Image (tube, coloured by chain):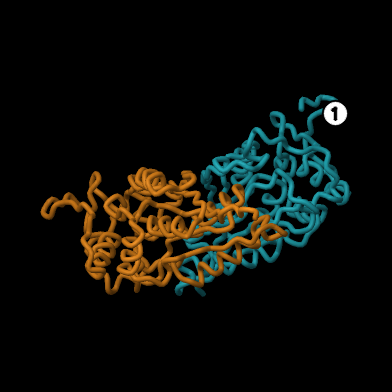
Chain colours: A cyan, B orange
Amino acid sequence: MKRRRPVRAVVLLSGGLDSTTVLAAALAAGREVHCLSVDYGQRHRAELARARALARLLGAAGHRVVKVDLSAFGGSALTDAAVAVPKGRSTRTMSREIPVTYVPARNTVMLSLALAHAEVIGAEEIHVGVNAVDYSGYPDCRPEFLAAFGKLARLATRAGVGGRPLRIVAPLLRLSKAGIIRLGTRLGVPYGRTTSCYDPVRDRACGRCDACQLRRKGFEEAGLPDPTRYVPAGRWRR
Amino acid sequence: MKRRRPVRAVVLLSGGLDSTTVLAAALAAGREVHCLSVDYGQRHRAELARARALARLLGAAGHRVVKVDLSAFGGSALTDAAVAVPKGRSTRTMSREIPVTYVPARNTVMLSLALAHAEVIGAEEIHVGVNAVDYSGYPDCRPEFLAAFGKLARLATRAGVGGRPLRIVAPLLRLSKAGIIRLGTRLGVPYGRTTSCYDPVRDRACGRCDACQLRRKGFEEAGLPDPTRYVPAGRWRR
């Protein structure tokens, strides 16, 4: 019997909790995983080094970093040092408005780059940690956005004119943060090595930005210990 | 009576024949034009300088260059020095296969960046010189691709959650190269200052790559003089 080659997948890996869980899930499903991290001029660039280490640790077949200078456009607290990262927002009302941490068209740009990579290496799937439940109110985290991108991807590439079909896989789309953490814990994700914070102080998470709050709440709801190293209380600098 | 502000548009400007015609058409239609050029690691980077000069000369309100390193992926003659630019292909059969000058997901990536820019500056339109007639067989030049991107753009951005709707405008989509040249000539486009060649030698066009051949044929069919400066015949280096 001829051995089929494993399905090849590009995983968009930021080094955060969500995308690392996606990486672990793709590997557990037997995919040959090629990670892609996007250096988009984000303030929290420590995550690129974490992404590289996590890709190696978990056993990805490859990891690539592509640079795109989204900070040239400005308009987001994540790429523009003049805009402050909001702290202490309520996790209950977070998703009702688009916060200043929203990076314009970020997921569209990142998925486009994943598409370019997928096309060159002949990958059949793009895996992405987009989540529509415990999210921060970004428009490009909604299921209808992903469906539209999937359609675009099939039309945009060689796949669209007779090649292999390309699938967008978003395994976390309808999970709560606690559900994501439970899934990743079953898969052995070393969450202590992932980073979610928008505004870390050295290698410590701030504990108060949207990402830190959602993460902390997720561990609480999952009833699991939170291995994140936070800045000690009372040592606030901003 | 209150004066309305002009419709704000992002024009993707490469400095080539097509996108410069799009710029002229947008200005003639009274748009406030913000040009965006993408430095994607292309070999023919002279076009970025031309784009900047053309944006100023024609009267755009702004011009921005955003860098994205598509050459990191390889796979195209336009970004990978190891892949030769094909010369002397027949313009009649060009569109039947995808050539090595195809840059994976290029239009998806460039439109995504235009979307980011449009969102930050509050533009209502993105104008792009995509053409589905005299094209080189790229999948991301088809009308259904553009329609899919328009849908994605509306879902991806603030516009998708209650903001202004965003339109993708492709005025050249169904024009022949000769038709584009006739339109641009009426609008006063200085075609001698535009550059289309994939493989120029200093500031001269090679005359034999797909882009040069389509351009030359366009001027012939339009019955207009071709102001392009070509490499003198017999001075071939590759």
Q: Nearer the viewer, residue A5 or B167?
A: B167
B210 sits left or right of A189 in the view: left
Does the rendering let one see residue B210?
A: yes
Q: Residues within 10 Å of mark 1 (few under 14, many from 20)?
A: few
A87 sits left or right of B135 in the view: right
Question: Which quadrant of the figure has residue A230?
Answer: top right
- In this view, the residue farthest toward the front is B1
Label 1 lies in what chain? A
Q: Nearer the viewer, residue B46 or B12?
A: B12
- How many marks the image carries: the answer is 1
Question: Which quadrant of the figure has residue B180?
Answer: bottom left
At 46% from the left edge and 46% from the top edge, which residue is drawn?
B69
* Residue A131 in the image, given as x and y percentages of width and height: 73, 57
> Which amino acid lies under the numbered mark 1 shown in the image of this protein?
Ala
At 64% from the left edge and 58% from the top edge, which residue is drawn?
B156
At 33% from the left edge and 56% from the top edge, which residue is drawn?
B188
* Residue A22 in the image, given as x and y percentages of width and height: 68, 55
A117 sits left or right of A223 in the view: left
At 54% from the left edge and 48% from the top edge, which residue is drawn?
A63
* Callout 1 secondary element: loop
* Residue B66 in the image, given as x and y percentages of width and height: 49, 45
* Residue B19 in the image, given as x and y percentages of width and height: 40, 57
Above/below status of B235 relative to B92: above
Mark 1, residue position: A233
Above/below status of B147 relative to B122: below
Q: Nearer the viewer, residue A129 or B102?
A: B102
In the rendered image, which quarter contains the N terminus of chain B?
A: bottom right
Question: Which quadrant of the figure has residue B225?
Answer: bottom left
Does the rendering let one see residue A113?
A: no
